[in-house]
Image: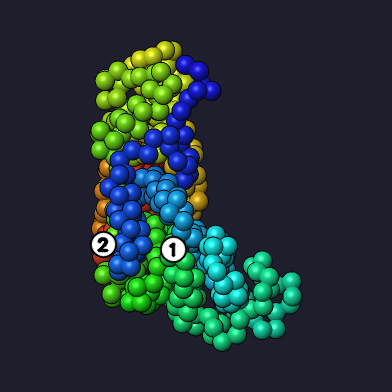
Amino acid sequence: MDPVRNPYAPGAGQRPPELAGRDTELTAFDVVLERIAHGRPERSLVLTGLRGVGKTVLLNQLRSAAISRGWGTGKIEARPEQSLRRPVSSALHMALRELGPRHGDQDSVAEVLGVVKAFAQRVAPADAKVRDRWQPGIDVPAATGRADSGDMEIDLVELLSDAAGVAADIGSGIALFIDEMQDIAPDDVSAICAACHELSQQGAPLIVVGAGLPHLPAVLSASKSYSERLFRYLRIDRLDREAADRALLAPAEREDVTFEPAALDALYEAADGYPYFVQAYGKVTWDVAASSPITADDVAMAAPAAEAELAVGFFGSRYDRATPAEREYMHAMAELGGPSGAAVATSEVAAALGRKPASLSPARDSLIKKGLVYSAERGQIAFTVPHFGRYLLRHPD
């Protein structure tokens, strides 16, 4: 098979050639956009799921849907220990640049840009050197007395309200997309919830679309008790058999290639329906196969190479970030949870290691911050990466 024509694309956030199995989420977002366009109240969205299920890909697809309707959009990726002021300012600046030329009153747009600038620059101390001040590329003076109080909650509410006003003036909307939302600092999470609450009460045409790990709803709930009613939560899971087959068959058939049913059986068993794995196994199998149709023997021949590639790039790169103490903790989780990577009790991990639970808290908390594990529920811990338990059992050192 010609490797140049290989249609499969395993990559972080890279859109697969066939976005299969996500019609429900795309349709739900279309309804949100339509309702807001007709002045109906609507909640912001939160996508949750393990790594490798395609949250970032879906987030980008939702953004494309908003752009196609003439909305202003901006996207950020949250990082631990980073304030949201600068990334949110950049995202809103981008959204307003998309909407601004369609607005009849450029002076009012300039005023809102001044608010964006004030919000961004509030992060710097008053006596900071000029080179330390971040300039967002906005050629208007920073506003005073608006979104510059230093209180993140107050400032973000004012900022988003003003930005939404620009969109409302031209009958459009703004969508702010936030990836890795679980990494937002607690004070900033509280500010986002407060801003979304205020905007929903105003009926303002601005929504937040977040994506994060399975414990993101708990993070939001810990910040504001009303967050359960504030967001619409969509759990992004692995693909069912029909969707996984379509993800493989549709791009292959565009290249006049197909799969034998037994090959699809073997690929689904290997990938377990996780979109990233579907692409990874599909890519290597294509390169190994001599001709169409691709057979189960081709899959069997490709599997070791695909697993070796995943072991280095998908699993190994994450494992290498862990300290010896954290690796010990994860190996204990793998032994208890088995190849499926089931959630385990933190007390069981401590017992397996012959340690007191409190002594393991630093390792567990560090693994959570690194995004390798998450607290599935109180007293439970699980891997954020599918099949990570299986990888650890196969690589005990």
Task: Please report whichever mark, 1 or 2, sits nearer to the chain's N-terminal start.
Answer: 1
Q: Would you say 270 lies left or right of 14 here? A: left
Observer able to see residue 367 = no
> Can residue 55 be seen?
yes
Give the answer, above or below, for where 36 lies relative to 284: below
- Rate crowding at label 1 as few (under 14), some (14 to 19) or many (20 or more) other CA atoms within 10 Å: many
Residue 91 point in image, percent of width and height: 53, 63
Task: Give me the residue at 47% from left, 21% from top.
Answer: 287
Query: Do the numbered discs 1 and 2 sit on residues whose CB atoms are within 8 Å?
Result: no
Residue drawn at point x = 30 percent, y = 44 percent: 23
Along the line of sight, the residue nearer the viewer: 92 or 227: 92
278 on left or right of 133: left
Front residue of 195/356: it is 195
Q: Quadrant of the C terminus?
A: top left
- Residue 30, given in percent of the width and then of the height, sits at 33, 53
Please tell me which residue is depicted at 32% across the width and 27% down the height of the picture: 267
Please name the amino acid that badge 1 sits on.
Ser
Q: Nearer the viewer, mark 1 or mark 2?
A: 1
On the image, numbered disc 2 is attached to which residue?
Answer: 377
Q: Which mark is residue 172?
A: 1
Secondary structure under the numbered disc 1 in the rendered image:
loop
Q: Tell me where residue 252 sits by quadrant.
A: top left
Residue 96 image point, x, y percent: 54, 65
Find the residue positioned furthest to the front.
104
Looking at the image, residue 142 sits to the left or right of residue 319; the answer is: right
- Numbered disc 2: secondary structure: loop
